[in-house]
Amino acid sequence: MKFNVKDFLRKYTMVIALVIVFILFCGLTNGRLLYAQNMSNLMLQNGYVLVLACGMLLCILTGGNIDLSVGAVICLVGGLAAVLISNKGMNPYLTIIICLVVGLLVGIWQGYWIGYKRIPPFITTLAGMFIFRGFGRLILDNKTVSIQSQDFLKVFTSYINIPGLDDTANYSALIVGVVVAVYVIFNVIRSRANKAKKGYRQNTAFSDYSKAVIIAVVILWYCYKLFQYKGISVMFIWVVAICLIYSFITSKTAFGRYFYAIGGNEKATQLSGIDTNKVYFIAYVNMGLLAGLAGLLCAARVGSVNGSTGTSFEMDAIGSCFIGGASAYGGSGTVGGVVIGALLLGVINMGMSIMGIGDSWQYVVKGAVLLIAVVFDVLSNRKNG
């Protein structure tokens, strides 16, 4: 299979954009963006975005549908956790379970109206945005409630420390980096061998191996930065686990392909025997559960919750999906693309913050990037017929 420059540029447009933006802000911040603490915080500050975006991707795949209520659900769940732990003295582990159940119930409520009653997702989740934000503020009594429970915070914000290994330095981060980098290269070798054995068509060896080496080098570099700071955080593990799970679901399971099928042609999907109502329902149930988890992550990272917690978080999640290549019409998009989109927004936010640029301009830049990504998607769809 010959290397095609146009196909390469079209396939990796957002990756190239991320690299360019990253290099640009490294220069504009005089290298401060590359500080170990900033590299660690880049993932932690965008952890909630990645978790929400994985769920939002499933909604978007069904036909460009979105969930506007996730920021309000974060306020509701985070506020509930703060009140139960700080004001009621409830066991933090039981609180986590209760909060996840609340997120799940929110998803069931909205999924029922969207999936089985076919109320438009925009209207249903817009109503949910007001309802759940209101409930969140009622629970908080319009106050800011802090969370002091170390047991709760350790579940989401502590750092991995292996006795005997991380006593003097965070060597576990380096070991994880080496293991993952070796696995990435080994996986490419195994995949190419299996395809060759079965006679499948595949990319050139140079293309596959160069891609694997670049990914491995980035992983090693990032883990070295974590080694220089505090090591690997538990929140980072939560986020990576969610991304891997949803990447597997969307790319390796028949159920995951149902979302793509509905976005491509819902009537044809129905005729093939797939219960599309159920798929819509599950998409929003899943979104509610992940919003609940994001609420816990956000509450633990900030250490407090108020009535404005979660404001505009849904826009960051939606923006990550569209910037990462998810089609505004549904039917296409990947978790890998979502990660690229979230990191692109994260680099823009962090770079502009380091430069001392206010929130107002950050909103302007993020909005412009989102518009460019969607325009690119629309024009590509028109060109392809």
Image (cartoon, grey):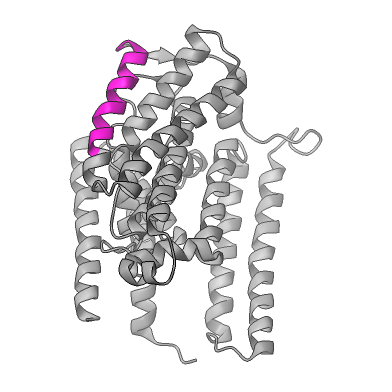
Q: Residue at x 19, y 53 (%)?
A: 368
Q: Position of residue 116 (x, y in %)?
A: 34, 48
What residue span does the magenta drawing correspond to?
Answer: 126-142
Which residue appears at 66% of the width and 46% of the height?
173
Q: What's the magenta bit mostly, secondary-structure-wise?
A: helix
Write down the quadrant of residue 185 in the picture: bottom right
Tell me the quadrant of the picture where the C terminus can be found.
bottom left
The answer to whether residue 95 is seen in the rendering is yes
Query: Is 238 on the left or on the right of 379, as rendered?
Result: right
Which corner quadrant of the image does residue 138 belong to?
Answer: top left
Residue 245 picture location, percent across and down = 56, 53
Looking at this rendering, what residue extends furthest in the right direction? Answer: 164
207 magenta-colored: no
What residue appears at the point 40 percent right and 65 percent down from the top-left corner?
260
Q: Is residue 124 above or below residue 66?
A: above
Residue 22: x %, y % from top left: 37, 55
The answer to whether residue 28 is above or below residue 294 is below
In which quarter of the view is residue 3 placed? bottom left
Q: Nearer the viewer, residue 64 or 87?
A: 64
Whether residue 33 sits left or right of residue 359 in the image: it is: right
**Left or right: 261 in relation to 234:** left
